[in-house]
Image (cartoon, rainbow, N blue to C red):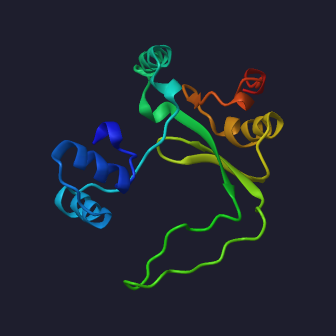
Amino acid sequence: MDETNDATLEELRHLLHERTQVLISVSTTDRMLRQKLNITVKKTLYLSLKASERVQQARVGFWASVADLAAKNLVFIDEAVMNLAMVRLTARSEKGKRARGSKPNRRGQNVSMVAALGFEQVLGQVNLLGSTDALSFEAFMAQRVIPQLWKGACVILDNCSIHSRLELEPLA
């Protein structure tokens, strides 16, 4: 199943036929997967770059560099974006009936959310209309995060491009 985990029911049905000479319907294939084999439809996508040897070595190096830090001194900062026109893509309905819903006619506005998370509390957070740029991120750090930091705090950022131009040391 691992090598064909994203195969359609039709493709799985034909693979089974090739291997066993038994041809079953698409609905039987689905029922067999869900009920007999307990296989669900879920998929997590990741960049293939994450699996490279270079990235794996960098991760080992990172964890080695933070291994001696106390968890209570770690502050993680991350950003996320949400589109205001998002709708749920799945819904429940009675068997045999289709669930209906409306979708926005236009693309909605993006909202950027940035937060600094400590071991016991949220040190700062901000929601911005549009995308976060280096200037707004630096202002967030200077006004909301740095005043909350303590001696020994270690701020951990991902490798987002807006972080690479920051000059935060003079602010501390």
The quarter of the rendered structure image containing the C terminus is top right
In the image, residue 40 lies at what x, y percent? 31, 56
Above or below residue 95? Residue 153 is: above
Q: Is residue 121 left or right of residue 127?
A: left
The quarter of the rendered structure image containing the N terminus is top left
Depth order, front residue of 15/31:
15
In the image, residue 118 lies at what x, y percent? 52, 41
Total tally of numbered discs in the picture = 0
Q: Measuring 75% from the left and 55% from the top, which residue is drawn there?
A: 110
In the image, residue 20 lies at what x, y percent? 16, 46
Above or below residue 90? Residue 158 is: above
Above or below residue 100? Residue 167 is: above
Q: Measuring 43% from the left and 82% from the top, which residue is drawn there?
A: 93
Determine the image quadrant of residue 137. Answer: top right
Depth order, front residue of 71/35:
35
Determine the image quadrant of residue 76. Answer: top right
Q: Residue furthest right?
A: 135
Q: Measuring 83% from the left and 36% from the top, which residue is drawn there?
A: 135
Q: Is residue 67 left or right of residue 22?
A: right
In the image, residue 125 lies at what x, y percent? 66, 49
Q: Residue furthest front?
A: 21
Q: Is residue 52 left or right of residue 114?
A: left
Q: Is residue 45 left or right of residue 156?
A: left
